[in-house]
Image: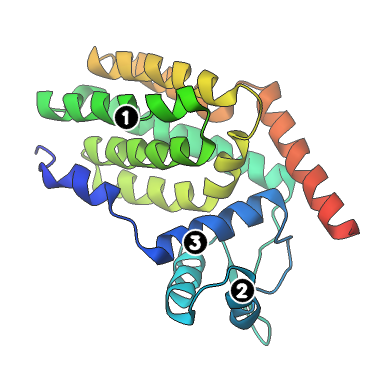
């Protein structure tokens, strides 16, 4: 089944709650909101500042996907993920997205291949401008479309859940020097394999892209830990 023309438009629709959610996610990933911190609505409303309605919706979204946790007598808190736990989550994410790429390469219609190419090319201006936020927004659209094009509802659902939980850490990686351009180059190779209907090659390239090829992933975890320690010390 082909993706309807309206699908691309829906992926571009963003609400104020979505924007607030992204900011909170980024603060969690960079350690501004450290593990164990209680996310009080009153304090957050003053911190941004925003009205309570979109803030409440953003917090509900974050809790529903596991980025934050509900604790008895404490409310919404930032969960604590060890570097080892994060590594395990990224390894699973790599396999899920590799499977999605393999399925998509073999099952996509010509229209869907065109949509994938367009979704990737839309991130080129942000890449050239080295605008990490704009690039991430296009990246998110790309992956959601990839999951849809796998034509496996269960795989798409599970991939999206883990994608959302890891979103703050994947966003953080784009802050590294030259990473945006490298990311775009890696994804270009993935798209080439998808368009060529080479499922195994697309899966292999996407798996390596998610794992950030070994030592880069280790650097990311070290950076997260360092930022968290600095924030907790101040």
Query: Gap between marks 1 and 2, in whole Å?
Result: 33 Å
Quadrant in the rendering for residue 119: top left
Q: How is the image coloured?
A: rainbow
Label 3: element kind: helix
Query: Gap between marks 3 and 1, in whole Å?
Result: 23 Å
Residue shown at the point (58%, 76%) measured from the top left? 45
Which residue is labeled 1 in the image? 122
On screen, residue 1 above or below 21: above
On screen, residue 210 above or below 200: below
Which residue is labeled 2 in the image? 44
Quick one: label 2 or label 3, which is nearer the N terminus? 3
The x, y position of residue 59, in whole percent, is 51, 71
Quick one: label 3 or label 1, which is nearer the N terminus? 3
How crowded pointer 2 is (Cα within 10 Å; few <14, some 14-19, many 20+) is rated as some
Who is closer to the viewer here, 98 or 169?
169
Query: Gap between marks 2 and 3, in whole Å?
Result: 12 Å
Who is closer to the viewer here, 20 or 220?
20
Who is closer to the viewer here, 6 or 195?
6
The x, y position of residue 62, in whole percent, is 50, 64
- Could one spot residue 95 in this view of the protein? yes
The quadrant the N terminus occupies is: top left
Label 1: element kind: loop
In the rendering, which numbered label is found on residue 21?
Answer: 3
């Amino acid at each position: 089944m082909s993706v309807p023309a309206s699908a691309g438009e829906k992926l571009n629709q963003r609400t104020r709650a979505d924007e607030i959610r992204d900011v909170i996610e980024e603060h969690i990933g960079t350690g501004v909101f450290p593990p164990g911190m209680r996310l009080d609505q009153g304090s957050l409303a003053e911190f941004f500042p925003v009205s309570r309605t979109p803030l409440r919706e953003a917090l509900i979204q974050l809790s529903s996907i596991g980025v934050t946790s509900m604790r008895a007598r404490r409310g919404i808190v930032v969960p604590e993920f060890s570097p080892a736990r994060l590594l395990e989550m990224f390894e699973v994410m790599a396999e899920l997205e590799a499977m999605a790429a393999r399925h998509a390469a073999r099952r996509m219609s010509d229209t869907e291949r065109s949509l994938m190419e367009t979704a990737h090319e839309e991130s080129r201006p942000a890449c050239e401008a080295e605008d990490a936020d704009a690039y991430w927004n296009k990246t998110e659209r790309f992956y959601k479309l990839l999951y849809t094009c796998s034509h496996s509802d269960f795989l798409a659902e599970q991939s999206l859940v883990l994608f959302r939980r890891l979103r703050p850490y994947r966003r953080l990686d784009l802050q590294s020097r030259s990473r945006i351009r490298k990311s775009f180059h890696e994804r270009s190779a993935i798209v080439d394999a998808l368009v060529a209907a080479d499922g195994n090659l697309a899966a292999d390239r996407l798996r390596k892209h998610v794992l950030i090829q070994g030592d880069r992933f280790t650097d990311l975890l070290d950076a997260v830990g360092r930022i968290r320690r600095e924030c907790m010390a101040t």
